Image (tube, rainbow, N blue to C red):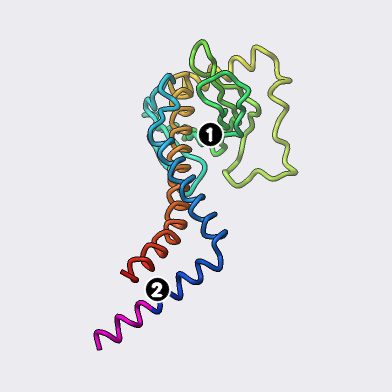
Amino acid sequence: MMLLGRVREVKQSVAHLRHLCHNPQKHLQDLELLKCFKSEIQFELSSNHFQNAQTGSLGDFVVESDSPSSKDVVFRRKFDSGEEVAVSAILGPPNYEKDTVFPRDAFMKVCLTKPALSSILQFDCGVHEETDKGSDFDIYNAYYLRSPTFLKPSNYRGPLFSTLDNELQHALKGYLIVKGIDISLTNFLLHYLHKREQEQYVNWLKKGEAAFEATEGSLRQSIEGLQ
């Protein structure tokens, strides 16, 4: 019985090797892709792309949401007065023409609530790296929401922020800075989001590596089965 079992294993191995021989180009491509995945993983793990970056600090904010499957992260800060500030941030598209440490800017939504008011004050902002001082942010829009789900396409969102009086623009930006949206936080956001993106990329590479390692493992198993 043991001999019959061994014969069956050898036949299966031979059949698999014949299959590989009939499709040599496909399996060579799989092995080449596996080599590329391994090389890219090694490069990413050995590189420190952001070693010269200013890392900043969360300050009094805490991480509320940071799921590995999500593109954005959410931070929140609560004041003793009952006022709350929530920040949602996500990376924008890469711009490799910029001579900066971080290749991407970040989109940031800042929502502020006060105990005495039912409305929410929301700011749409962009965070970008400044080569001389770390980072800065610009406000694109500012509007009030009666609730997080109230805003509809037909509702008036307010004027374009860039059309507001310059003094009012500076005052609103200063208000956000006082609430903790300062250079330390924007430095932290850019560094955190880019490091997070790199980790997600490495995880994606490892999934590809595992998929193509199955081909290499199958070939090795068939060869060992003949020995």
Q: What range of the chain is rendered magenta?
A: 1-10
Quickly name the residue at label 1.
111
Locate residue 100, reporting x and y percent: 54, 19
Residue visible at 57% across and 59% down in the picture: 25
Locate residue 71, reporting x and y percent: 52, 43
> In which quadrant of the rendered image does the N terminus lie?
bottom left
Q: Amino acid at mark 1?
A: Cys
Q: Does the magenta run of residues contain 171?
A: no
Looking at the image, tell me whether mark 2 or mark 1 is earlier in sequence order: 2
Q: Is residue 85 left or right of residue 57?
A: right
Q: Does the magenta run of residues contain 2?
A: yes
**Label 1 secondary element:** strand
Q: Which mark is residue 13?
A: 2
Residue visible at 73% across and 37% down in the picture: 156
Residue 67 in view here: no
Q: Main secondary structure of the magenta part?
A: helix
